[in-house]
């Protein structure tokens, strides 16, 4: 049961009424948190109830370890407690997510020494959201070990922090010092904040259901049949995937942040207009901000201090390699991470130097080259294998000569009709326009939220109508067959 389903919003509406009418009072904090925990576990169990055992084991262990870390004075024993937490949490992650990847990497070595050796691949389903809540519990344990936060003594509060349903499946990854205290107090019902949260949920749903799912039809067909691509359709598929991924994940985060706000909780911002970033480094500082901060805090700064740019480059490559593998268990994800680490060191100095010159055109060109390089690297992110990525890249050189009719027919074979393609391009332009206003005209953005309510209600109506009229694809002419496409109705990051 995902955020985009009617069943979820019906259940959430009932819980919203119950929450503000009976639960959110100073005298009922524990009951409120218990209800939040039950709802969160039911939400998670709706995917597969067996996954509850993993998140419960991980949470209970880190709850106990946190208390013992705070009371233990012997440093060697404290390190052993921290290591036990890391081994179990990362062990779950390695077993469920990376077992087959490790087997594939080790198999050539085993075959060299033992030609008859046969290594076992596992076919079980990856628990949804395991990468997100695992990193959340690990950050808690490390923070307690470092003494930057106090250990949580209430098991209900801690379990609710880990399993809080708005951000359970795909983040934002919340630090205990920012989210945990919010479970210790009652929240005020603020009508203006609720209206703003509702509008943000609509915008997130619009980006997911109307934009990302529409672009997914073309992208899925293109990557399912990469041998049929030409230069123009390959470029279209690459650009469409950038916006699909962005609207899908940022749409999820908008909905998660909005839902949490409807319950009185503040979640961290996870996106800050990365498509308008000035260089490659800034793209990742603005994209999936909480995971970027996690790797910076718990990996990059935990490594030995760099003495020169070479050492710094090695650290950046290592962190980006881990970030690539965090997204998926495949050599394509590893290569994607390494490529972006290299791009930061090879292109960012040129982009930064060009931005300091008097030539505005040069600055725009180098900035565009940087973004194009990032978008091309996402071919590895989207491809199932390195071989498939190679086919897509080779398709960039297919400058077939076509008349307008043949070109139109070629585009149509990837699932979207002419009208739907025009709608998709218009929607991409709308997203860029909205983000340009937020980035370059913050005063106009503030006026929208603080000015006359007619603008906000009109926007809510337009978004609602857009979701209803443009967000459902089965049976629509020129919109492909949604049931035949590769799960475009699910959030991409839920699989991580």
Image (cartoon, rainbow, N blue to C red):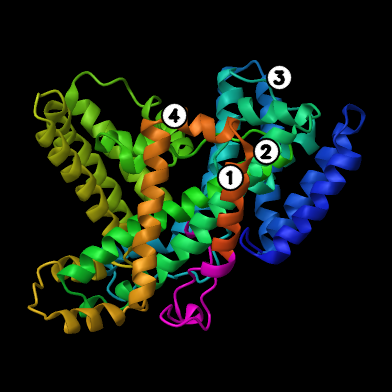
From the viewer's side, name the closer residue of 322 and 368. Answer: 368
Badge 4 element: helix
Badge 2 element: helix
As drawn, the label of residue 71 is: 3
Alpha carbon separation for disc pair 4 and 3: 48 Å
Alpha carbon separation for disc pair 1 and 3: 43 Å
Query: In which quadrant of the rendered view does residue 466 lie?
Result: bottom right
**Is residue 26 on the magenta stretch?**
no
Instruction: Report the side of 258 relative to 223 (left or right).
Output: right
The structure residue drawn at horizontal position 62% and vertical position 17%, both measured from the top left corner, is: 74
Query: In terms of sequence position, does the residue under pointer 1 or pointer 4 come before the other?
Result: 1
As drawn, the label of residue 200 is: 1
Q: Does the residue at mark 1 contact the one at mark 2 (Cβ under 8 Å)? A: yes
Query: In terms of sequence position, does the residue under pointer 1 or pointer 3 come before the other?
Result: 3
As drawn, the label of residue 261 is: 2
The structure residue drawn at horizontal position 30% and vertical position 65%, both measured from the top left corner, is: 110
Callout 3 environment at 10 Å: few (<14), some (14 to 19), or many (20+)? few
Callout 1 environment at 10 Å: few (<14), some (14 to 19), or many (20+)? many
Query: In terms of sequence position, does the residue under pointer 3 or pointer 2 come before the other?
Result: 3
Magenta stretch, residue numbers: 468-496
**From the viewer's perspective, is residue 132 above or below residue 65?**
below
From the viewer's side, name the closer residue of 89 and 275. Answer: 275
The structure residue drawn at horizontal position 63% and vertical position 20%, both measured from the top left corner, is: 149
Query: In terms of sequence position, does the residue under pointer 4 or pointer 3 come before the other?
Result: 3
Q: Position of residue 19 (x, y in %)?
A: 84, 43
As drawn, the label of residue 442 is: 4
Q: Does the residue at mark 1 contact the one at mark 3 (Cβ under 8 Å)? A: no
Alpha carbon separation for disc pair 4 and 2: 22 Å
Comparing marks 1 and 2, which lies closer to the viewer? 1
Q: Main secondary structure of the magenta part?
A: loop
From the viewer's side, name the closer residue of 354 and 348. Answer: 354
Callout 4 environment at 10 Å: few (<14), some (14 to 19), or many (20+)? few
């Amino acid at each position: 049961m995902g955020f985009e389903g009617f069943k979820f919003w019906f259940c959430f509406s009932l819980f919203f009424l119950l929450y503000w009418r009976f639960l959110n009072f100073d005298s009922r904090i524990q009951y409120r948190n218990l209800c939040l925990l039950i709802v969160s576990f039911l939400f998670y169990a709706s995917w597969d109830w067996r996954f509850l055992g993993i998140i419960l084991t991980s949470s209970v262990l880190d709850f106990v370890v946190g208390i013992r870390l705070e009371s233990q004075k012997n440093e060697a024993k404290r390190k052993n407690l921290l290591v036990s937490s890391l081994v179990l949490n990362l062990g779950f992650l390695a077993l469920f997510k990376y077992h087959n990847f490790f087997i594939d990497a080790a198999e050539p070595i085993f075959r060299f020494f033992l030609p008859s050796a046969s290594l076992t691949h596992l076919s079980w389903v990856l628990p949804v959201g395991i990468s997100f809540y695992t990193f959340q519990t690990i950050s808690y344990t490390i923070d307690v070990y470092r003494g930057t936060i106090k250990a949580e003594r209430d098991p209900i509060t801690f379990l609710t922090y880990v399993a809080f349903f708005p951000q359970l499946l795909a983040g934002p990854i919340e630090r205990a010092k920012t989210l945990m205290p919010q479970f210790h107090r009652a929240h005020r019902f603020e009508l203006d904040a609720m209206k703003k949260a509702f509008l943000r949920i609509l915008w997130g749903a619009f980006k997911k259901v109307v934009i990302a799912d529409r672009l997914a039809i073309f992208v899925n067909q293109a990557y399912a049949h990469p041998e049929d691509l030409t230069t123009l359709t390959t470029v279209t598929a690459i650009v469409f995937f950038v916006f699909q991924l962005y609207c899908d994940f940022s749409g999820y985060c908008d909905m998660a942040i909005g839902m949490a706000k409807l319950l009185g909780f503040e979640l961290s911002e996870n996106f800050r207009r990365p498509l308008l970033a000035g260089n490659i480094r800034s793209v990742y500082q603005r994209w999936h901000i909480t995971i970027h901060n996690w790797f910076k805090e718990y990996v990059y700064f935990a490594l030995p201090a760099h003495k020169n740019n070479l050492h710094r480059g090695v650290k950046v490559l290592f962190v980006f390699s881990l970030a690539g593998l965090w997204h998926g268990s495949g050599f394509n994800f590893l290569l994607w991470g390494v490529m972006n680490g290299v791009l930061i060191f090879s292109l960012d100095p040129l982009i930064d130097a060009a931005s300091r010159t008097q030539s505005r055109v040069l600055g725009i060109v180098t900035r565009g080259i940087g973004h194009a390089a990032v978008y091309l690297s996402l071919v590895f992110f989207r491809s199932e294998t390195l071989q498939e990525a190679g086919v897509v890249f080779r398709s960039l050189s297919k400058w077939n000569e076509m008349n307008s009719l043949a070109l139109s027919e070629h585009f149509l074979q990837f699932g979207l009709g002419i009208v739907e393609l025009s709608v998709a391009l218009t929607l991409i332009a709308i997203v860029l326009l909205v983000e340009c206003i937020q980035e370059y005209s913050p005063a106009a953005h503030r006026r929208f939220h603080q000015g006359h309510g007619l603008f906000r209600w009109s926007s809510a109506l337009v978004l609602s109508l857009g979701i209803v009229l443009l967000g459902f694809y089965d049976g629509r002419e020129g919109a492909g067959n949604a049931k035949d496409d590769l799960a475009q109705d699910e959030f991409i990051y839920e699989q991580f």
